[in-house]
Image: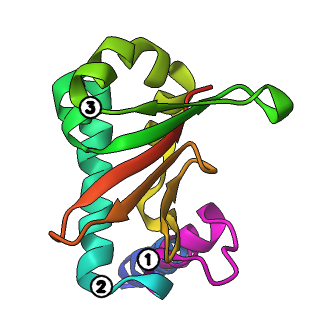
Amino acid sequence: MISVMRWNSWAICALLIVAAVAGNSQTAVCPDFDGGAIDDHYSLEDAAKARRFLADLKAAIHQDNKIQIGSMMLYPFLVGSGTGQNTVRREIRNQAQFLAAYPTIITAGVRNSVESQNPECLFAIKEGIMIGNGVVWFRLQPDGKFKIISMVAN
């Protein structure tokens, strides 16, 4: 009887620890957006679509699927590179131009930012949703789909 009670006590403690860690996981991972959390600016349905868009983008980048990534862009879109006064912005007008410039747009920095983005920690404002401290911005279109509107390829 005592061993059963001891096992139950250990099981209850373990469950409480797991629940506490799980309950704090988002606050431990997500920065304080100060009103910029995706759920503050989008309906639950659109926020779920945005998270799905991120998952699709992660998969396309992981698979190096240039065509899929190109189809996720809103043309024309801007690509920035460099920093500070050395920042260069260029307009990508169509998918053919995107595919030709792909290696200079989908850089290791872009890949890392997208792949490491926690879907629960998307920053959003009315103009769009940010991945990786502004490396990628995407926005909901009138047709109900999300599209990438700009990137910083560093």
Q: Secondary structure at mark 1?
A: helix
The residues tagged by marks 2 and 3 sit, at their Cα atoms, a distance apart of 31 Å
Q: Which residue is mark 2?
A: 44
Determine the residue positioned at 60% across, 61% down: 29
Magenta region, mostly helix, strand or loop? helix
Which labelled disc corresponds to residue 15? Answer: 1
Question: Of the residues under marks 3 and 1, which one precedes in the sequence?
Answer: 1
Q: Amino acid at mark 3?
A: Asn
Q: How many marks?
A: 3
Q: Amino acid at mark 1?
A: Leu
The magenta-colored residue range is 19-39
Which labelled disc corresponds to residue 133? Answer: none
Determine the residue positioned at 26% across, 34% down: 69
Q: Amino acid at mark 2?
A: Leu
Residue 95 in the image: state x and y as whole percent: 23, 29
Whether residue 35 is situated above or below residue 115 in the rendered picture: below
Question: Of the residues under marks 2 and 3, which one precedes in the sequence?
Answer: 2
The residues tagged by marks 3 and 1 sit, at their Cα atoms, a distance apart of 53 Å
| Left or right of 105, for residue 95 | left
Q: Are marks 2 and 1 in contact (CB under 8 Å)?
A: no
Asked if residue 26 is among those painted magenta in the image, a careful observer would answer yes
Q: Dot 1: within a 10 Å radius of its alpha carbon, few (fewer than 14), some, or many (20 or more) residues? A: few
Residue 128 in the image: state x and y as whole percent: 46, 66
Quarter of the picture containing the N terminus is bottom left
Residue 56 in the image: state x and y as whole percent: 23, 46
Q: Which residue is mark 3?
A: 94
Whether residue 135 is situated above or below residue 3 in the rendered picture: above
Q: Secondary structure at mark 3?
A: loop
| Left or right of 55, for residue 8 | right
**Closer to the eye: label 2 or 1:** 2
Q: Dot 2: within a 10 Å radius of its alpha carbon, few (fewer than 14), some, or many (20 or more) residues? A: few
